Image (spheres, helix red, strand yellow):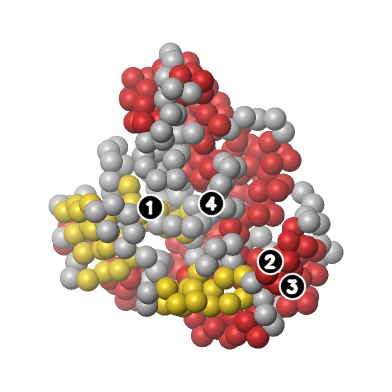
Amino acid sequence: MAVTLRFGPADLLRTRFAVSPAFETIAAIRLTAPGESPGHHERWLHAARQRLGGLDLRPVTVLQPRRGYSPDFLAPPPGGPATTIGEDLARIAATPPEQARAEISRALAGTPGASDSELGRSLLGDPAAVLTQLTGLIRNAWHAMVEPVWPRVRALLDADISHQSRRLAEGGLGRLLTELHPTLSWHDGVLTRSRGDDEHRDLRGEGVVLMPSCFKWDQVLVVLDEPWQPTVIYPARGIGALWEPVAGTADAALAKLLGTTRANILSGLTEPASTTAIAYRYALAPATVSQHLTVLRDAGMVAGARHRYEIRYRRTELGDAVVAARAATLTP
């Protein structure tokens, strides 16, 4: 199964980059849900939970199923790379209440029993009141979770856009899209995402928004529903090194033992990943990643297993123990 987008000449002229503070906040909230892996954001999430206090994020997390529809109004389409959270919140608050209710109902329908739960019934109540509640919750989550680290996050997103823009200038759109993420490929004017439901769209001059994300770290999203311009949301390049260890912390001690890059790779292997995927996360050459994985494998901390056409690496029990010892000493 795959999602495909066919480009025409006019679409090449309307392809642009954008950043969405609201989407980053929604994606950050999602990482607090049970069963979600924080991936590279473990240290950040530990600190963010402390800042959240007793703030109940379930009214937002229940609307973000692992697979299925999430309401578009919670993160409006970004107007460009300089959109502010204030602008995003104003657009969320201005959503017509009946539209918000329809999108909430659609999202809840994707999770068995969600509509009949106490929380689901409250979200299907007075749409204007629910819209006010959700807008305020996103605002509070931004202040507690994202705003304190926004300069660092924004710098990563801007660096990704600069890098991808150079790729576009040097090799054209085909090269850019081919190298954007391992799940994306480009052939004969068609962009394909190799995972997800079967869906095809002839763009017909609409173009595409390319949106790097920090907190949506584990997969590529393709948004085709209105009011979005067709949008590809992808993990920002170099995300694995975003939370570099601070001197005097357990992370720094692990980095001193293994080397910063190997420590980051080991900590980031929360699920099996290929050399190509790891290279993208840490903005490294695949050959460099291969060398580091060889050292970690020889030390007994990672192991590789073939998955279709690639080798995916995972932590061993020893690797888990090393990372768990580090996590036990995390401080906000």
| Residue under pointer 1 | 221
Q: Mark 1 or mark 2, which has the lower sequence index? A: 1
Mark 2 vs 4, N-terminal side: 4
Residue at image position (37%, 74%) is 308
Give the mark toward the camera: 1 or 2: 2
What amino acid type should be assigned to the residue bearing mark 4? Phe
Residue contact between numbered discs 3 and 2, judged by CB atoms under 8 Å: no
Q: Compared with residue 112, is residue 155 higher up or lower down, i.e. above or below?
A: below
The residue at which mark 2 appears reads as 320
In the figure, residue 142 lies in which quadrant?
top right
| Image x and y of residue 214, in percent | 53, 54
Q: Residue 183 sits in which quadrant? A: bottom left
Residue 255's label in the rendered image is 3
Residue positioned most to the top: 126
The mark nearer the N terminus, 3 or 2, is 3
Gap between marks 2 and 4 measured at Cα: 23 Å
Residue with the mark numbered 4: 215
Residue type at mark 2: give it: Asp
* Alpha carbons under labels 3 and 4: distance apart: 23 Å
Gap in angstroms between the C-alphas marked 1 and 2: 29 Å
Q: How far separated are the C-alphas under marks 1 and 3?
A: 32 Å
